[in-house]
Image (cartoon, coloured by chain):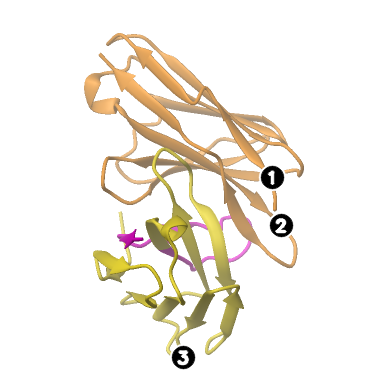
Chain colours: A yellow, B orange
Amino acid sequence: GQQLNQSPQSMFIQEGEDVSMNCTSSSIFNTWLWYKQEPGEGPVLLIALYKAGELTSNGRLTAQFGITRKDSFLNISASIPSDVGIYFCAGLRDGGATNKLIFGTGTLLAVQP
Amino acid sequence: GAVVSQHPSRVICKSGTSVKIECRSLDFQATTMFWYRQFPKQSLMLMATSNEGSKATYEQGVEKDKFLINHASLTLSTLTVTSAHPEDSSFYICSARSSGVWDTQYFGPGTRLTVL
């Protein structure tokens, strides 16, 4: 199935550093979502973006919906050890009752205290 | 946020047996639920879309006779892996769609299936 391209694939940083990751697609999405997944758990929604150009924050997290509707980025400021996990972007193209999410390839984040 | 549960969290079974996984939306009604499969170090891949009271819609390459989905109520969907084989071992995750202004999906904690 289709997947969105995420980069970087993995990041190993020191506590306190800022993190930036992005997600790109060859096709347009109407909604972008960012999830975090910890080992053995399901994804947890972090931020949802509904309009092109939208910039939304959730605590230390900031995400933007690209103007072209083909990309999105997620920033984490002042990282802490509990930020460790895999971050997935997801795009939603279809409206109505279907609402199928297309997931990105994931970015593994490791934070060293 | 909305809560979605899955049961069991882990299951180990012998090859050839069938396994049923339940997905429940605990504090909201979900007309649509989704089933995903995630192999180690990979992303989530959608298997099927489950609509309450109707047949599930399967993604290309997913065998509907092998992965039986039932969505009998607005809070429960089940996935049955029939005649399981070792290659079916994976992390199965469901999500439930919460409609409204914040129209998005909330995920369950996942079920780890190991087929011996």
Secondary-structure class at tag 2: loop
Q: Which residue is mark 3?
A: A67
**Marks 3/1: CA–CA distance:** 32 Å
Q: Which residue is mark 2?
A: B99
Q: Which residue is mark 1?
A: B31
Is residue A104 on the magenta stretch?
yes
**Residue at position x 23%, y 21% from top?**
B86
Q: For the residues labelled 1 and 2, say whether their Cβ atoms are less than 8 Å apart.
A: yes
Tell me which corner region of the image, top left, top right, bottom left or bottom right, holds residue B71.
Answer: top right
Query: Upstream in the sequence, badge 1 or badge 2?
Result: 1
Q: For the residues labelled 3 and 1, say whether their Cβ atoms are less than 8 Å apart.
A: no
One can see residue A50 in this view: no
The kind of residue on which mark 2 rests is: Ser
Vertical comparison of B89 with A10: above or below: above
Q: Quadrant of the N terminus of chain A?
A: bottom left
Characterize the local packing of mark 3: few (<14), some (14-19) or many (20 or more) Cα atoms within 10 angstroms.
Answer: few
The kind of residue on which mark 3 rests is: Ile
Secondary-structure class at tag 3: loop
**Marks 2/3: CA–CA distance:** 25 Å
Q: Residue A63 shows which numbered tag?
A: none
Q: Are discs 2 and 3 both within one chain?
A: no
**Residue at position x 23%, y 26% from top?**
B87
**Residue at position x 56%, y 35% from top?**
B55
Is residue B2 on the magenta stretch?
no
Tell me which corner region of the image, top left, top right, bottom left or bottom right, holds residue B63.
Answer: top left
Q: Which chain letter matches label 1?
A: B
Q: Which residues are magenta?
A: A89-113
Q: Which chain letter matches label 2?
A: B
Secondary-structure class at tag 1: loop
